[in-house]
Amino acid sequence: MEKNSSLEQVLVVLVSISLVFNAVSLYFLTGYWFGEKLQWSETNGVGIKRAVMDAVLELEYAKVGGKENFELMQKAQKFSFQDQLPQVKQYITSREKGGSAPTTTTETTSNEVKTLSQEEIALLKKDAVIEGDKNAEVTLIEYSDMECPFCIRQHNEEKAIENVRAKYGNKVNSTFKHNRWVNHPGTEKKAVAVLCAKTAGNDSAYVKLYKSIYSGSTLRSVVDVAQLPELAKTAGVDTKKWQECYDNKATLPIFDMQTQEANKFNLGGTPGTLVINNKTGKYTTIEGAYPTSQFESAIESVLK
């Protein structure tokens, strides 16, 4: 029931966004706003609407560093949404038939198995906070955003990485990294805060802080950035050192570097997970939040 409720919430959010977008589009095209005609003078109405549209676009361009980046993100978001359509269609079909929401997808979520060199693996794991046996045969590298609803779902509901680590024991470890994707209001601040927890504390503080941010978030409400100092203190950091690091955004370059790292493996959306066999170099990817069974399949594919 909790899974059904969460998926319903996601669908409601998607529909709400679509309605708002359509309302804004209708306003710019016709001059109507929720059924009421806004008065534009015959001489300057078109010019004013165009100026407003241009101003809105300029704000969006500024958020992502220019028009070219904005257009690239629009294309990427289109592909990301298309990747989620099979799940949405399955859910709607199941509900219409009186069933429950599906927990798996008929689409394959992992790409073909490829190979990394030992040098490339070492570089990926350099300075990473490894959870579990550091000598494990398989490493899961999650690239995530602490305000992404699908990421919150993966951590709080599916708990796929937690589940496979419990099943495989010392054979599988994991590490949590950051990815600037949609760039929600608190995305950057939370990533900087967690990365600062490592420099102003230790690996344990890093893990405690990112997990506390997830556990305090839901699909409808995320942890407020104003809570980060207190959460960092609870995680066990040197508060003065952490605050200085956080205020100066000292770990921002690491955040951006990890985002670029995710992009190299075509993990543009969040969450995205690299599944690596540390001995053979075989790896595959999982793009999105999926049930534990998908992670198990990916692990088995690199162990062959």
Image: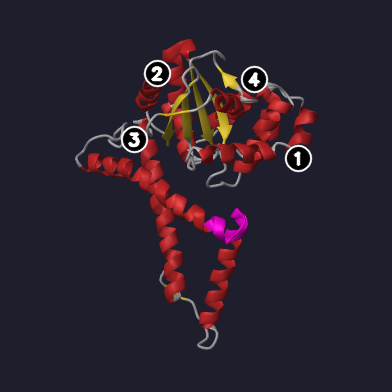
The numbered mark at residue 207 is none
49 and 276: which is toward the camera: 276
Q: Amino acid at mark 3?
A: Asn
Q: Which residue lies most toward the bottom here?
A: 43
Kind of element beneath mark 1: helix
- Residue at 53% x, 34% y is 143
Task: Classify residue 209 by image quadrant.
Answer: top right
Q: Kindly report the distance in space between the C-alpha atoms of the residues bearing marks 2 and 4.
A: 29 Å
CA gap, disc 3 and disc 2: 33 Å
First-in-chain label (2 vs 1):
1
Query: Going by the image, does 234 lie left or right of 140?
Result: right
Instruction: Using a 10 Å C-alpha cutoff, classify the residue at mark 2 as few (fewer than 14 neighbours), some (14 to 19) or many (20 or more).
Output: some
Res. 303 mark = 2
Mark 4: give few (<14), some (14-19) or many (20+) Cα within 10 Å: some
In space, the residues marked 1 and 3 are separated at their CA atoms by: 40 Å
- Pick whichever, 248 or 274, lies toward us: 274
Residue 169 in view, yes or no: yes
Quarter holding the C terminus is top left
The vertical placement of 12 against 139, above or below, is below
Quarter holding residue 176: top right
Name the amino acid, label 4: Ser
Which of the two labelled residues, at mark 2 and mark 4, occupies the earlier sequence position? Answer: 4
Which residue is disc 4 drawn over?
204
Bounds of the magenta span?
60-70
Q: Residue furthest left?
A: 97
